[in-house]
Image (cartoon, rainbow, N blue to C red):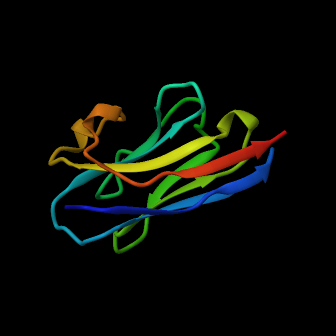
């Protein structure tokens, strides 16, 4: 059972930066898709960014494109989300998630596809 442990987050003023981390509990040689999601109060959970385990197929929601960057460390045991030029509307609970997938073409940013989830971390941006 893969476990995802999140860290980072917190409060920042508009225009500032934060970085989220998501540590994978165990190494695997299987390929997988990993993503970041967020959920604001009263809203549905939405996909923010995703990446395939070989570092390819990075994709971003239009609302964060050009401001956020998804990446992995060289050992592929930690997923990151670098958030720059943050806005008040980025305020939400952020989650990392993953599912095993052999094809990078099937690495979609669809909530229901993701099997493993981190515990969530709050991000608050003040204007």
Between 98 and 65, the one nearer to me in the picture: 98
In the image: residue 27, left or right of residue 38: left
Task: Find residue 119 and report its horizontal and vertical position in percent.
Answer: 43, 54
Task: Find residue 63 and report its horizontal and vertical position in percent.
Answer: 60, 30
Task: Find residue 101 and report its horizontal and vertical position in percent.
Answer: 18, 47
In the image: residue 66, left or right of residue 49: right
In the image: residue 127, left or right of residue 56: right
Q: Residue at x 51, y 32 (%)?
A: 61
Between 107 and 22, the one nearer to me in the picture: 22
* Quadrant of image for the N terminus: bottom left
In the image: residue 75, left or right of residue 9: left
Quadrant of the rendered structure where residue 103 is? top left
Q: Is residue 80 visible?
A: yes
Task: Find residue 25 and report its horizontal and vertical position in percent.
Answer: 30, 70
The image shows residue 46, relative to residue 11, as above or below, that is above
Q: Residue at x 29, y 32 (%)?
A: 112
Q: Residue at x 47, y 31 (%)?
A: 46
Quadrant of the rendered structure where residue 111 is? top left
């Amino acid at each position: 059972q893969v476990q995802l442990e999140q860290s980072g987050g917190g409060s920042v003023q508009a225009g500032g930066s934060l970085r989220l981390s998501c540590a994978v509990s165990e190494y695997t040689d299987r390929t997988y898709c990993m993503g970041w999601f967020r959920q604001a109060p009263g809203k549905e959970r939405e996909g923010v960014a995703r990446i395939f385990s070989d570092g390819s197929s990075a994709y971003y929601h239009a609302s964060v494109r050009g401001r956020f960057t998804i990446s992995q460390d060289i050992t592929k045991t930690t997923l990151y989300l670098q958030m720059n030029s943050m806005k008040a509307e980025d305020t939400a609970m952020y989650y990392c998630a993953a599912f095993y997938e052999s094809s990078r073409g099937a690495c979609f940013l669809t909530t229901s596809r993701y099997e493993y989830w981190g515990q969530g971390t709050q991000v608050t941006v003040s204007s």
